[in-house]
């Protein structure tokens, strides 16, 4: 059934609710997000395993590392401008913080015409989440998928509602899906599904909208083409690559909904049950604000956009809630970014309510909502800072291990295999041994799997050693176990740091 609206969208530049220009409010939110990334969520945390793989692809300081089949080139393209200049992790974090802030502004800007201050509030709610803050300066695809999804739905709504001058909205829609399809093609398909359905049906009281559908298709085609070319060049074809993706990600019907709710809970809580309770309480509060936002948006130009945002959030989160065996809050960033829009409308409505009949009651309600919102964001900032410091502590040894390897004579050209090979190799400016698939389970994490399959570990190490010698590289295996692996007998051994059970095994040279 067609959804007809009567209220006209607000013209760009008009003052939104509360007397502020929505674009200025959104710019302040984006600026605050960048400042929070730089001064609250410390940019000093060293690279994770995944980040080292992504950043190395276009680095002029570190050899490109082999990437698994489920990784796409988009994040490497986004980090390329800084990676070709420097390998400094601090510089990379600062660059990503600014990039994320600009992306936040561009993603929610298409919603200002329809949502006004509600869009700016939605951006604030999303940017103020701890899971968003901890992913604001990392070289991972999830935040960019979220921002691209918000921009895509916003440009789609603008394109189908505009009577004239749709060219800019269509170009923005195609660009949004170019970004998403490059950083994570599978997520792009899930995000596009509700919009393609909406384009085929007269849900806005008009005829189907082929132009927006074509723009989405063009954006998807760019990332899809790159993915297919990579599949043939590196993995033996698309079908083989898909099989490898399924193996690595352990995709299947797992249904980890409870764990995902816990992942959204407060990181301050100790224990799964407390996180689950906090997550449920947060979910109830968000549901109430969401219903309020939908109620106030009835029979307005905002309602179709809010409904499409919710439908897209549902399809974006469905595969992560049902197909993966390991939960993580960052997988739900696209859904959170989209749901924040109607929730922002609910917050705006709540702040405009009157309390009683006395004078100044509206201001009292606005002040109360402001205090609660500030308290919520403050707690999220604190939680994000704790999480960032924890990551920094966990990874601070990797550069120290690299310095120790230099002392042992492992200098470029060199190749590192074993535990945390990508991070240590990046810090040492070495190549990393191929860590995909069985190599990851074996030579990288020298542990229980390696103990059960010593022949496989020996074969992988021998392959890596041959590749290193053929390239004229010094070779080292890093193992985080005090017991010498049998296949490394006769190799020299050195402890990397005092009181650290991490050891470097170096073969005879040449």
Image (cartoon, helix red, strand yellow):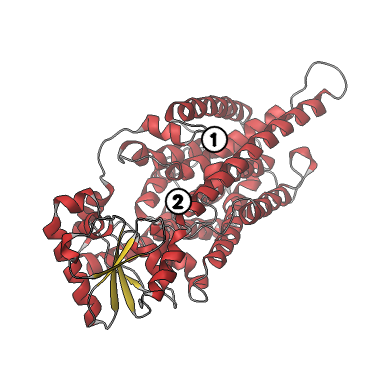
Q: Nearer the viewer, residue 381 or 430?
A: 430
Question: Residue 414 at x, y = what percent?
Answer: 33, 77
Question: Residue 30 at x, y = what percent?
Answer: 65, 52
The correct choice, above or below, for 501 with respect to 369 in the image is: below
Pointer 1 or 2: first along the chain:
2
Q: Name the residue under label 2.
A: 142
Question: Residue 160 at x, y = what percent?
Answer: 52, 47
Q: Which mark is residue 268?
A: 1
The correct choice, above or below, for 132 with respect to 278 in the image is: below
**Mark 2 secondary-structure assignment:** helix
In this view, the residue farthest toward the front is: 498
Residue 160 visible, this orientation: no
Neighbours of disc 2 within 10 Å: few (<14), some (14-19), many (20+): many
**Mark 1 secondary-structure assignment:** loop
Q: Which of 159 and 228 is in front in this view?
A: 228
Neighbours of disc 1 within 10 Å: few (<14), some (14-19), many (20+): some
Q: Nearer the viewer, residue 154 or 254?
A: 254
Q: Which of 97 and 273 is in front in this view?
A: 273
| Discs 1, 2 touching: Cβ within 8 Å | no
């Amino acid at each position: 059934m067609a959804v007809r609206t009567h209220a006209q969208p607000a013209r760009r530049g008009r003052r939104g609710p509360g007397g502020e220009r929505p674009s200025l409010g959104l710019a302040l939110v984006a600026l605050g997000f960048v400042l929070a990334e730089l001064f609250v969520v410390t940019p000093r945390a060293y690279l994770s395993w995944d980040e080292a793989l992504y950043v190395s692809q276009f680095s002029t300081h570190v050899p490109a590392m082999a990437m698994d089949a489920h990784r796409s080139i988009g994040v490497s393209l986004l980090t390329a401008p800084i990676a070709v200049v420097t390998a400094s992790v601090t510089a990379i974090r600062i660059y990503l913080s600014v990039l994320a802030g600009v992306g936040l502004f561009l993603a929610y800007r298409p919603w200002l015409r329809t949502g006004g201050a509600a869009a700016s509030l939605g951006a604030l709610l999303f940017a103020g989440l701890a899971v968003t803050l901890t992913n604001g300066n990392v070289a991972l695809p999830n935040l960019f998928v979220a921002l691209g999804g918000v921009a895509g739905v916003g440009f789609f709504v603008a394109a189908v509602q505009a009577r004239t001058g749709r060219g800019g909205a269509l170009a923005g829609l195609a660009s949004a899906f170019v970004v998403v399809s490059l950083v994570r093609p599978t997520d792009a398909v899930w995000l596009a599904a509700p919009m393609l359905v909406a384009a085929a049906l007269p849900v806005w009281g008009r005829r189907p909208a082929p132009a927006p559908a074509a723009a989405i298709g063009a954006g998807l085609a760019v990332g899809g083409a790159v993915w297919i070319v990579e599949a043939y060049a590196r993995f033996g074809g698309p079908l083989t690559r898909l099989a490898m993706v399924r193996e690595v990600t352990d995709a299947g019907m797992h249904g980890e909904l409870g764990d995902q709710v816990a992942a959204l809970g407060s990181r301050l809580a100790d224990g799964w049950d407390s996180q689950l309770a906090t997550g449920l309480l947060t979910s109830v509060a968000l549901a109430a604000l969401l219903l309020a936002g939908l109620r106030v948006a009835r029979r307005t130009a905002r309602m179709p956009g809010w409904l499409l945002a919710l439908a897209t959030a549902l399809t974006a989160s469905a595969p992560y809630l049902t197909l993966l065996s390991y939960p993580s809050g960052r997988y739900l960033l696209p859904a959170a970014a989209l749901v924040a829009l109607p929730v922002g409308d609910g917050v705006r409505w709540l702040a405009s309510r009157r309390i009683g009949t006395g004078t100044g009651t509206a201001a009292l309600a606005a002040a109360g909502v402001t205090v609660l919102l500030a308290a919520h964001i403050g707690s999220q900032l604190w939680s994000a800072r704790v999480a960032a410091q924890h990551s920094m502590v966990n990874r601070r040894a990797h550069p120290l291990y690299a310095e120790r390897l230099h002392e042992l004579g492992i200098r470029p050209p060199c190749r590192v295999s074993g535990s945390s090979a990508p991070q240590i190799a990046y810090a040492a400016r070495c190549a990393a041994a191929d860590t995909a698939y069985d190599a990851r389970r074996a030579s990288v994490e020298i542990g229980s799997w390696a103990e059960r399959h010593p022949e496989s570990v020996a074969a992988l190490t021998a392959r890596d050693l041959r590749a290193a010698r053929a390239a004229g590289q010094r070779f080292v295996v890093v193992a985080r176990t005090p017991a010498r692996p049998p296949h490394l007998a006769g190799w020299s051994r050195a402890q990397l740091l005092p009181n650290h059970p991490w050891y470097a095994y170096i073969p005879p040279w040449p």
